[in-house]
Image (cartoon, coloured by chain):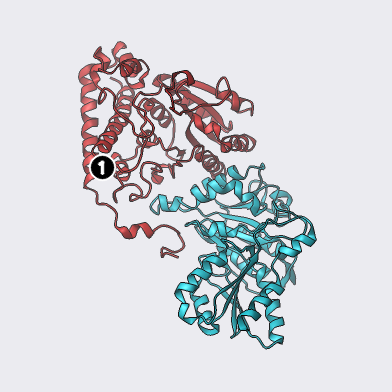
Chain colours: A cyan, B red
Amino acid sequence: MELTFIDIIRRALDEEMDRDAAIYLLGEDVAAGGAFGVTKGLVDKHGTNRVKNTPISEAAITGMATGAALCGLRPVLEIMFIDFATLAMDCLVNQAAKYRYMSGGQLSVPMVVRTQVGAAGGAAAQHSQSLESWFIHVPGLIVVAPSSPVEAYGLLKSAIRLSDPVLFIEHKRLYAMKEDLPEGAGPLPIGQARVARAGKDVTIIVYSAMVRTALAAADNLAKEGISCEVIDLRTLVPLDIETLLKSVTKTRRVVIAHEAVEVGGVGAEIAARLGSLAFEELDAPIVRVGCPFAPIPFAPELEKALLPGSREIEKAVRELIA
Amino acid sequence: MSANVSSNLAAMLKIRRFEEQCIAMARAGKLPGHYHVYIGQEATAVAACAALKPEDFLFSTWRNHGHLLARGASPGKMLAEILGRSGGYAGGKSGTLHLSANDLGMPTTSALVGGSLPLATGAALACKRQGKGIAVAFFGDAGLEEGAFYESMIIAQVWQVPILFVCENNSIPPKDRKRGQYTSSTLPAQRLGDVTQSLQIPSEAVDGTDLTAMEECFKRLTAEVRNGGGPRFVEVCCSRWPGNIMTWPELPGGDWQIDWAFGGKPDVDAMVAWLSSDPLSLYLKKQLAAGALDRTQIEAIDAAVKKEMTGAAQFALDSAFPEASEAYRHVFAAQESAL
């Protein structure tokens, strides 16, 4: 049976909660399902003690999840929009990310912060951002960005089972995407990229919703005789540099694409690493595709004008091949 | 001398002599970084910890030495940590600012103003879910200047989690501040407890120089919290010790002297004035007046404490500096290798 991204996340949460009584959900309106209905109905099965609505207090609920994680529980916190993670930054950056380290390994913070990113039409500048690059800069945080329902199922299960704080980034535009959940699907490895499409001419490195976009671009380019290898990073931290190097050695050309602003984005870090580790393997400079340096505007026509899509990826690939 | 009197005295002296040791280490150039001491607030930690059980969780701040010692932490391992040595509680990675002892129910201390309040509230939620223990959050009056304070109070009250908020108000009243001296509280409320009272959290104030009053207060409040009464807030009114200089404490008048409880005086006026609000001196005088102990007994306890601190200092100094490779460890639980 086909399930949407939302249904599949809910299923993963439900199954993990069945497996381990220490797991509980908290966040704004999570008992009612949250802003997108991801947690809908879980309170009926697991009760208000395990599916807890919080006040609109991102700083405190993130701190509470961290404190509870230090003291025996395994919280899964929902920050409704990644834009609101700004209010939780002290706890995420200064506290949750560092307690294992500062305690010399005595502590662990088994906490997942689910949040969502991206522009999906008319949400404007404070509800549409892709801020993931801020978090890859902080040692101690795992950053996961699944690209499809089935991927999200396995990666969320793994994230919940880790003993580290995880930022689990869902993309608004993926929420309605449907896939069959294969029989026997289980946790997926954290820190292993996935070759979403094999190819030989150009490597396109992507994550989250941009994987689907890159696969569409690769389809179009194939018609022109250009063979693209699409790599889904799955996790931004840890970054599977080995898989990237393997692909680059084969294709010798790289495009890195993300919806986030290009300046200071995840692509900058990957380009720098590949540039220093695989300089001799590259036939051309690494090309980045990302949002121009502007906030996301409200008007759908303006939003569309900014967001990088299949066309921008195709253009970048053609220029590399030319 | 009752066992309670002698253990109270030993516990307070232990903190004071430990802090004096820290200041001596800093003067000798052995203590890297800045640090904060708990002199003048010893009675608070001693009274609060006496009311707690092993399953309870404590959260503290950068001024945490007293809380840890009162909870039973090893002075040697604490001092080694403060000196950045491998024998410290966190192998030198926390230092004084984040000093903690997880095995004593003190998972961590946040050096961010108000930073541990949400953590402690989360710990209290864990206690409630697991059906045992309570959480205690120690913080300063400046914590009330942070938004996390209000968010934590609201959730603690709405969810009725078992937590005792202990605000140690050691602020210098604005009129007494020297030029450029910054300290809290800038809160425009008559009493700190008025703030939590408005959120229906029962609150009270207690004299931080009076150990006996605090013993009663903490015993009663922790019982209320433990029995499902929800959160409680207590303002401990401390008197700021003259050596409490941000961020390099000094010892005006030198180490604290037993003789000061017997009519002797420090040679620094500010210290003479402060002794009338020193919880340790006051406790001694009160017990002496009641005939509960004599000078010989005090000297014997102090000698034992000093001996313990000398041993702690030796342990810390003998402890090796951490290997450079340790800097890369413990970033993640999942994989110890650098990413």
Q: Nearer the viewer, residue B242 or B280?
A: B242
Q: Out of B16 and A240, give the one closest to the viewer.
A: A240
Q: Residue at x 35, y 35 (%)?
A: B69
Give the quadrant of the N terminus of chain B: top left
Q: Position of residue B85 (x, y in %)?
A: 29, 49
Q: Amino acid at mark 1?
A: Lys
User: What is the residue that sits farthest to the bottom in this orientation?
Assistant: A225
Image vertical order of residue A2 relative to residue B51, above or below = below
Q: Chain of mark 1?
A: B
Nearer to the camera, B266 or A39: B266
Rendered position, B220 above or below B77:
above
Q: Secondary structure under badge 1?
A: loop
Instruction: Report which residue position mark 1 lands on.
Output: B30
Find residue B236 and report its horizontal and vertical position in percent: 47, 24
Between residue B143 and residue B261, name the one nearer to us.
B143
The answer to whether residue B216 is left or right of residue A28 is left
Residue A7 appears in the picture as rendered: no
Q: Quadrant of the C terminus of chain B?
A: bottom left
Quadrant assignment, res B323: bottom left
Tally of marks: 1
Q: Percent x, y for residue B143?
A: 52, 33
Q: Is residue B60 above or below residue A285?
A: above
Q: Characterize the local packing of mark 1: few (<14), some (14-19) or many (20 or more) Cα atoms within 10 angstroms.
A: some
Q: Position of residue B265 (x, y in %)?
A: 25, 15
Task: Report whether B76 appears left or right of B179.
Answer: left
Left or right of A88 in this view: B179: left
